[in-house]
Every structure is written in structure tokens, then in C-alpha cells.
Amino acid sequence: MNIKKSNYLIILLSVFTITSCGKNEKINLTTDEGLIKLKELVIEQFGEDLEIYSFSMSSKEDLSDDLGGMTISYFKEDGEIYSNTYNAVVYGEESNLEGEKKKEQITKIRAKWNTPEGNGKIKLKNLSFENIIPNIRKAMEILGDNVGTAYIKNYEIKAEPKTNAIISNFKLQFTPLKNATHLEGKRIITEYREAYFQVNANGDVNLKKK
């Protein structure tokens, strides 16, 4: 499959050595063990019975698979939309839960999800991460042979309104197979690209424009 270069964003990353401190264990988003820990963390931080319509997570930095944070969005009985965000340990900062916040710009979301009674819902204890790694593999197949290492930058899981079908969107960062790094003075410069993907209710993974 031919991929147009315009679907990629080519970026140069200057790498410095930074020591991360913190008591919390890192969670790798591309391993089975890491995703099991992620599910445990979701339940620990947000509870298991909360019904959400969207879950998103992101890595702590570019070219990293370690969890940086996660956000849930949900309706409440008052008909308003709320969110809550967990920030993982990054560069020595302690992890924290920001607390429930009402979303101010909700007209577009509410129109799409119709009414609180009709919106798509996922109970957190039923939130599944088992398709993340297979979807990343499918995405790498789409990208072709010139991919060195791929990393999850962000990943979103949503329940469609009315049908409750599960769909996903994610962004990968990946290095070319050859000549990904070079020296500029004392700095190591890494070239990487970004690609965006969508997963429909049937589990089909498709490349999409930003």
C-alpha cells in the first residue's frame, strides 16, 4: 500500500539525558504487562462503575511508550459533561489526579450524543485495552517497511452514541528504518514522523489525515 508523504509530519528531536525521579512505577503502553497495569490504574484512580463516553491516554514525551497521563469524559445526572485527568510521574513530578471538571464547550458534543440517556457509554470495569497492541501492529503494516521503531503518542477509545459501538483514534510516532539519528555538536538529533489512525467499529485500522 502506498502512503503519501503528506500524511506524515517529519520532526527533528534533540535528545538530552534527563533523569526521572519518582516512586511511581512506569507503565509501558505497548506491552501486555503494561496494559494490565494501566487497567488497574484506571480502576484505582477513577473507580470501576463510572460510565464514560471517552477515554484517552498519552505518552510522557516524544518517542516514548511510557504513560504520561489519561483523561476520561462522561455525562452526569445534571446533563452536563465532565472530565477528570490523571497525570503520571514525569521528570520527578509526583503523579496526581486533577479532579472533576465541567466542560465549558459542550454544545457540539451534546448535539452529537443527543441526550444523556442516549449517549454512548462504557463502564470503566469493562474498558478493554486488548486491541491496542494488535491495532499498532496493523498500523505499522500500513506504514510499510521503512519503519524503525514506533511509539504511541496518544490513544483514544470512544463509545458511539446510540449504538455504543467502540471506535478508536491514535497517533504514532516512528523513526525511519535507517539514518534516524545524527550528531550536531554534542547533541543527538533524531528524525521521526507522525501518523494518525482511526479504528472503526469492525476493528478496521485506517490511516487518516491530521
Image: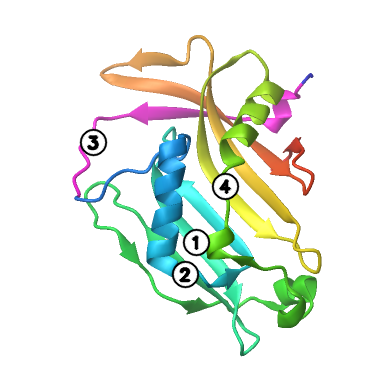
Depth order, front residue of 43/16: 43
* Nearer to me, 178 or 117: 117
Q: Residue 67: percent from the left, percent from the top?
A: 40, 46
Q: Quadrant of residue 174?
A: top right
- Whether residues under marks 2 and 1 lie with C-beta atoms below 8 angstroms apart, the answer is yes
Q: Which mark is residue 84?
A: 2
N-terminal of the pair, mark 2 or mark 3, is 3
Q: Nearer the viewer, mark 2 or mark 3?
A: 2
CA neighbours of label 2 inside 10 A, class few (<14), some (14 to 19), many (20+): some
Q: Marks 1 and 3: which is nearer the front?
A: 1
- Which residue is more in the foreground, 145 or 122? 122
**Residue 185 in the figure: left or right of residue 205:** left
Tell me how far mark 1 sits from mark 3, CA to CA. Answer: 26 Å
Mark 3, residue position: 18
- Is residue 154 magenta-colored? no
Tell me the CA gap for discs 4 and 3.
Answer: 25 Å
On the image, the x and y values in percent for residue 74 come to 59, 73
Above or below, 149 relative to 55: above
Q: Tell me if mark 1 has few (under 14), some (14-19) or many (20+) residues whose alpha carbon lies within 10 angstroms of its own.
A: some
The amino acid beneath tag 4 is Tyr
Q: Nearer the viewer, mark 4 or mark 3?
A: 4
Vertical placement of residue 158 versus 197, above or below: below
Q: Residue at x 74, y 81 (%)?
A: 117
Q: First in sequence: mark 1 or mark 3?
A: 3
Provide the residue designation for mark 4.
155
Q: Is residue 145 visible?
A: yes
Magenta residues span: 3-22
Q: Mark 2 is on which residue type? A: Asn
Q: Which residue is pictured at 71% across the width and 71% down the height?
A: 109
Mark 4 or mark 3: whose residue is earlier in sequence: 3
x and y percentages locating residue 183 in the rendered image: 34, 14
